[in-house]
Amino acid sequence: MKSEHRILSVILFAAVAAAPLTYSTTEAAEQVAAAPAKANYYTKLVDIDFVKKYAVIPVRDDVMIIDSRPAARKYDIGHIPGAVNIPDTQFDELAPKLLPQDKSKLLIFYCEGPDCVLSHKGAFKAEKLGYTNIVVYTEGYPEWAKKGNMGAVSPAFVKKQLDAKAPMTLVDSRPTARKYDKGHIPGAISIPDSEFDKLTGMLPTDKTASVIFYCEDLTCVLSPKSAAKAVALGYTNVMTMPAGYVGWEQAYGTGATASGAASTAAAPAGKGPEIVQGKEKGTITAASFEKILKEAPDSIVLVDVRDPAEFAAGSFKNAINIPADSLSKKVDTLPADKPIVFFCSTGARSGEAYDIVQLLKPELKAYFFSGKVKFAGDGSYTIIDAK
């Protein structure tokens, strides 16, 4: 009898050892009992809850999500937001260009579900290249979509729909005057996220109709926010284009425009370096902005108009957080004794904040940075001037 127990124990141990590793949000590295991995399948697996932590906009710096499916047939028409497309058939060509230089960065591969081997093949290839932190979301995009998570499309898909004159409502969620008027995808309508509730009449009456939202780029949260609002209104065929107008420009050049503005001047600041105004009224140049941040940050009031979660993830040390969509209610809290500089991640919301102040309290000495600001986990930042 004892020998039978020993044999059974050995069999059970072997079965558990052969089971794939499944990482979840609560058991990040705990081995679980599961069906033995298929031949040639990667064994470090993650579930949808794990992926949700990383599939966010703005995209996280500590991860790369990789869609191993063909571009035109699969990725372009629907993928996990923020995912990079490296089709298995093009891995050797694209991996050196797209995979991160940091080989310890988390890589999450996925494809078309449990029977799809493409993501597993990609994981093995990345491992051979020296990457050490690789997992596979084996249920892939079918489960992601089935469970009601927002899907994303590529600029290539939008272009194909426009060329085919397919029924689609394309929505630009950026501020109208600051962004949309200066360049937008042809055929797109302007519904700024901050004015979404006022302009819902511009959306199609048929709530099953295709609606695609976009904003600036992979750091911009305006289109995901608007898309979520549309879903809350009952729209059932809603997608985002996370690459945004920047991605469109990179692929197809400058889009349609409506208006523009230009003026360059110097404006007085508080004690400290002078605020040098950019080409557009109310802007501050990147050089001037950086100089003030380094030499006299207390001479201005820095207002981060991003969402609280973005602010918490990283901002300037002495900045205050007033999200753009709540600024109109808090404009009276802004001080009048110092210049105010609004900033965000792309220049869209900061420009909108400036417009709000000009409308509601024009006597304030307000400016905005129209370029990009990116914060790293170590507290450092990168400032990129607007084009």
Image (cartoon, helix red, strand yellow):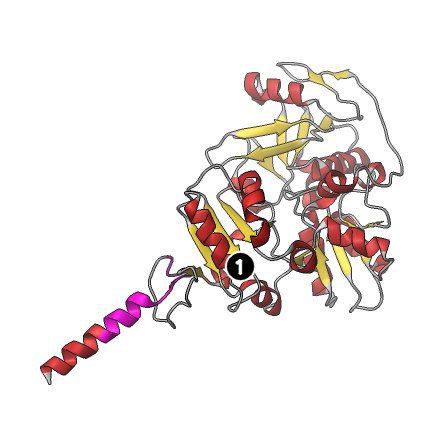
* Image: 322 above or below 166: above
Tell me which amino acid carries mark 1: Leu
Magenta stretch encompasses residue 125 = no
The boundaries of the magenta stretch are 11-28
Q: Locate residue 122, reporting x and y percent.
A: 50, 53
* Image: 360 above or below 206: above
64 vs 62, nearest the viewer = 64
Tell which residue pokes out farthest to the bottom in this image. 1
104 vs 269, nearest the viewer = 104
339 vs 167, nearest the viewer = 167
Residue in the image at 43% along x and 40% along y: 103
- Residue receiving disc 1: 118
Q: Locate residue 21, reporting x and y percent.
A: 37, 62
Residue in the image at 72% along x and 54% along y: 226
Q: Which quarter of the picture shows residue 80?
A: bottom right
20 left or right of 245 in image:
left
273 left or right of 211 in image:
left
Q: Which quarter of the picture shows residue 40?
A: bottom left
Magenta stretch encompasses residue 18 = yes
Quarter of the picture containing the N terminus is bottom left
* Image: 210 above or below 160: below
Q: Locate residue 338, reporting x and y percent.
A: 66, 23
Can residue 87 be seen here? The reply is no
Quarter of the picture containing the C terminus is top right
Q: Locate residue 117, reporting x and y percent.
A: 51, 62
- Secondary structure type for disc 1: helix
Residue in the image at 75% along x and 54% along y: 157
Can residue 219 be seen here? The reply is yes
Tell which residue pokes out farthest to the left in this image. 2
Tell which residue pokes out farthest to the right in this image. 258
283 left or right of 11 in image:
right
